[in-house]
Amino acid sequence: MKGIRFVLAAAALVALGGTTLVAAHAATSTLTVTLNAENGSGETGTAVLTQESGDVKVVVTIKNAPAGPQPMHIHAGTCANLNPTPAYPLTSVSNGASTTTVKGVTIDDLLAKPYAINVHKSTSDLGTYVACGDIKAS
């Protein structure tokens, strides 16, 4: 009888330990990325990333942005060393705002290696970045 109680107690401890282990690795549900001005643009803002099932919703707000569309992407790398090929397209910023749902990715995927969000000056001047922010845990 004591042996059965011991086994049951051990099983309960293992179950509790497993629960604690899972909770310690909970997925990131939201993350705010600060977008800093580049090339003297004066454009600053935030990108709020929210996990929605297997997708990430990206809501961008930029101060001092022009009315016209400004293409925006998530790139591999950092603002200081950006891979020029976009990893994930985002909806262009228009009147200082943009909302995009990036399918099939998680915030934790974006935190696993360096990624950055960058904003281009315009559709006719993609070579000039006006704002950028590294995606990193705060």
Image: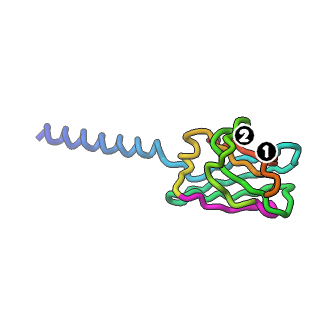
Q: Position of residue 87 (x, y in %)?
A: 61, 49
Query: Is the C terminus in the top left, top right, bottom left or bottom right quadrant?
Result: top right
Query: Is the N terminus in the top left, top right, bottom left or bottom right quadrant?
Result: top left
Q: Nearer the viewer, residue 15 or 93?
A: 93
Q: Please, what secondary structure does the residue beneath circle 1 have? A: strand
Q: Position of residue 70 (x, y in %)?
A: 78, 57
Q: Earlier in the sequence, mark 1 or mark 2?
A: 1
Q: Nearer the viewer, residue 4 or 67?
A: 67
Q: Which residues are magenta?
A: 93-103
Above or below, 125 against 113 in this view is below
Q: Amino acid at mark 2?
A: Cys
Name the residue: 79% across, 62% down: 69
Q: Which residue is mark 1?
A: 36
The image quarter containing residue 5 is: top left
Q: Please, what secondary structure does the residue beneath circle 2 have? A: loop
Name the residue: 73% across, 36% down: 80
Residues at circles 1 and 2 in contact by the CB criterion of under 8 Å: yes
Q: Position of residue 17 (x, y in %)?
A: 35, 40
As drawn, the label of residue 79 is 2
Magenta highlight on residue 15: no
Q: Would you say 38 lies left or right of 100 here?
A: right
Q: Nearer the viewer, residue 85 or 56?
A: 85
Query: Which numbered mark, 1 or 2, is in the foreground of this view?
Result: 2
Q: Position of residue 118 (x, y in %)?
A: 73, 48
Q: Would you say 32 lies left or right of 95 here?
A: left
Name the residue: 56% across, 56% down: 51
* Mark pair 1, 2: CA separation: 10 Å
